Image (cartoon, rainbow, N blue to C red):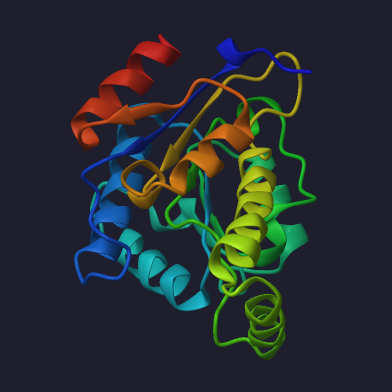
Amino acid sequence: PFHRSQAIMGAIRTAPDPDTPEYLPYVAQTIRDLHVTFGKNILVLLTANAALSAIYQMLRTMPDIDRQNVLAQNISGGRHALLEQFKEQSRMILLGTDSFWEGIDVPGNACEIVVIPRLPFPVPSHPLVQAIAEKMTAEHGESFMSYAIPEAVIRFRQGCGRLIRTSRDRGALVVLDNRIVNKSYGKQFIRSLDTDFQTFDDRAAMIAAVTSFFS
């Protein structure tokens, strides 16, 4: 029911690969740049508790970020308490996993930027995921395209849906997993949004585009 003009959505093509040592510091620095430049509430949807904890610690050591403005699921408090604090205050950064990808409603100025650092693929080491993958491999000869991609696309759409909640909302979605633009399967994630999706050459280009959008 929402119009494409309500949001700017895109990914940074030159972001480090998610499995490299440079990746988490890059994510933290990007969140910092968005926070300092725009001063808006930022929701960061992560796929692993270890990454959440690492980024939380990095953000809290940055001199131009008030520690009180950084909230992390299961570190700063429970889901309900964090959401209420996020809604009631400004210039907040909320880091969440799992349950924050769906079922939360933060309309208006309470959430104007959503950052997705990594595409939400099923965790391959999880016993249920392993069992389903084995079943799909037996039936289709592989499990990545027939199971992992569809599951991740559904989760991705749910996460992106946290940004625009009413017909009056405006916001920016920033994806930091370069696979969405550099891998052929990334097109499935982009098509699932049914909107205009941009590719930014670097972090500075992303900041410039988002600045233009909000202004």
User: Quadrant where the C terminus lies?
Assistant: top left
Q: Tell me if residue 185 comes above or below residue 20 in the rendering.
A: above
Q: Tell me if residue 69 comes above or below residue 200 in the rendering.
A: below
Q: Is residue 85 left or right of residue 203?
A: right
Location of residue 72 in the rendering, given as x and y in whole percent from the top left corner: 54, 64
Q: Is residue 195 left or right of residue 15?
A: right
Location of residue 17 in the rendering, given as x and y in whole percent from the top left corner: 27, 60
Q: Tell me if residue 131 comes above or below residue 95 in the rendering.
A: below
Q: Is residue 201 left or right of residue 97?
A: left
Location of residue 57 in the rendering, given as x and y in whole percent from the top left corner: 36, 70
Give the number of marks: 0
Question: For residue 39, which quarter of the picture?
Answer: top left
Name the residue: 79% across, 18% down: 1
Name the residue: 22% across, 26% down: 205
Residue 61 in view in this figure: no
User: Front-most of 143 and 195?
Assistant: 143
Location of residue 152 in the rendering, given as x and y in whole percent from the top left corner: 60, 58
Question: For residue 2, which quarter of the picture?
Answer: top right
User: Front-most of 141 and 16?
Assistant: 141
Residue 214 in view in this figure: yes
* Residue that lies at the very extreme toward the bottom in this rendered image: 127
